[in-house]
Image: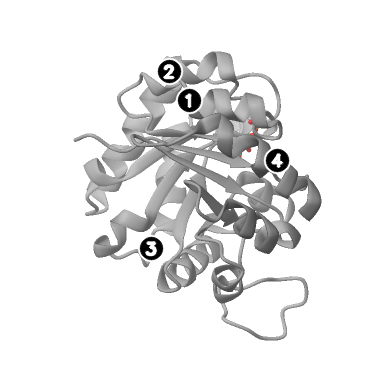
Amino acid sequence: MSRRPFLAGNWKMFKTGDQAVAFIEEFVPLIGDLTDRDAALAVPATALQRAADAAKGSPVIIGAQNLHWENEGAFTGEISAGMIVSAGAKMAIIGHSERRQYFGDTDEWVSKKLSAALAAGLLAVVCVGETLAERESGRTFEVLATQLKGSLADFKAQDEKNLILAYEPVWAIGTGKTATKEEAQETQAFIRKELGSLGLPAEAIRILYGGSVKPDNAQALMAQPDIDGLLVGGASLKADSFAKIVKYGN
Ligand code: 13P
């Protein structure tokens, strides 16, 4: 089955509204018409509205980096799926390893956030990945299986068009140490197999790789059969480098 490539940037805690608009104005002409792939940017909450306005009429999908599962309430500092939609955004990253590591996101929270995102019509990018200690102790597959089972606990198969998985080995994030294409492929094939054993249409679900993706390794990663897209941190902060990644192979 051919899965449409999905190239996403995750800006993390970088860029103001003004900087987001300037980036998009530079980036959109660089990528041109995207007939055979998707491009997305997950921006800080304070830049959502302005980024979505700036991207209007372009193929660029704007998304949030996190959300709360409740629609509204006394949850200081949080934003809801409805707020993300009303800002004009169409996507949310859920369960990024930095959320799991520094802000206490658990698989149970990821599952609740996923349900809220899908109910609001957002495209949800659910992240999983092992730490260096877990990989070195041979526990990668066990850790990923647990994360997938917990994170997708309430996921209904009819929503598969709006679910994207991202494999981000924690040891490859921001370290310059990319997983080799063979390591990423092997792990992502395992993730696809697990999706199947959870009763999900695994062949239809896109699985992204993230962790020190750069313009010069994007094409080799994308040539792997189970890598359907990339989730890019540092190299998505400059319009020309992210445009090169989006246009890999051209
Ligand atoms: P880097 O591309 O900076 O390693 O970050 C990866 C990441 O965490 C994307 O979500």
Q: Who comes first in sequence, dot 4 or dot 1?
A: 4
Which percent across, then down, holds residue 151?
A: 45, 57
Mark 3 neighbour class, 10 Å CA radius: few under 14, some 14 to 19, many 20 or more: some
Ligand 1 within 8 Å of the CB at mark 2 = no
Q: Secondary structure at mark 1?
A: loop
The residue where tag 2 is placed is 250
**Nearer to us: label 3 or label 1:** 1
| CB within 8 Å, label 4 to label 1 | no
Q: CA distance from mark 3 to mark 2?
A: 39 Å
| Rendered residue at 37%/67% (across/down) | 154
Left of 181 or right of it: where is 203? left
Q: Secondary structure at mark 4?
A: helix
Q: How many marks?
A: 4
Which percent across, then down, holds residue 10?
A: 63, 43
The residue where tag 1 is placed is 247
Mark 2 neighbour class, 10 Å CA radius: few under 14, some 14 to 19, many 20 or more: few
Q: Secondary structure at mark 2?
A: loop
| Rendered residue at 66%/32% (across/down) | 239
Outermost residue toward the left in this view = 1
Residue 23: assigned label: 4
Mark yes or no: residue 189 visible: yes
- What amino acid type is highlighted by mark number 1? Lys
Q: CA distance from mark 4 to mark 1?
A: 17 Å
Picture layout, residue 78 above or below residue 232: below
**Viewer-side residue, 76 vs 88:** 88
